[in-house]
Image: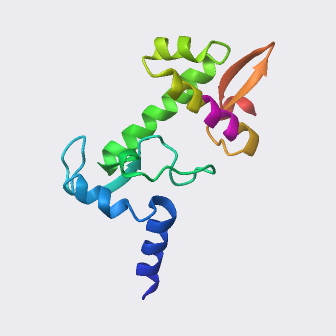
Amino acid sequence: MNDKLYLKKWREDRWYNGNRELAIQRDGSKCVKCGKTSSLDVHHKDFMGRGYTGKINNDLTNLETLCDGCHRKAHAKRERYLLKVAGLWDKSNREVGRQLKISHTLVGEIKKELLSKILTGNDPFYMVRRTDGVYRANKAEERE
């Protein structure tokens, strides 16, 4: 097996438990958002895929096929939610969920992700800091 095939197999097993190709086949080898058939990625709907340090959910129900453009849009939307939740840190998950029109469970997951980024120092773009009892989001350039 050459290096390229080995690396592909390792990536499939590590980040998708071998379900990447199954997800692409299930979705008809096209983006589930726009129908594009080239430059396809497999996206973890819960955003806890490659790079996530906790337990990765590689169940087929958590995977969807997206083209590169739709995949970037999905992650950009996630970053916006991270900032919005950080700005509303002191409110309950249900209250934040109602305000952002997302589930309170997702709000809880986003808060966990924010804390994880803070504790691991793995947050190149934003951080949340406590100021007078309130957590606030700050862009990286504001930190220096």
Residue sitting at x 33%, y 51%? 68
Residue sitting at x 66%, y 41%? 123
Q: Main secondary structure of the magenta part?
A: helix
Closer to the camera in the image, 67 or 44: 44
**Extreme-right residue of the structure:** 132
**Relative side of 98 to 113, left or right:** left
Residue 55 to residue 34: above or below: below
Residue 90 lies in quadrant: top right
- On the image, the x and y values in percent for residue 69 come to 32, 46
Q: For the N terminus, which image quadrant?
A: bottom left
Residue 104 to residue 40: above or below: above
Q: For the C terminus, which image quadrant?
A: top right
Residue sitting at x 44%, y 36%? 76
Q: Count all numbered tags in the image, as a single digit.
A: 0
Residue 39 visible: no
Residue 41 visible: yes
Per the rendered image, the range of residues in magenta is 111-117
Residue 85 lies in quadrant: top right
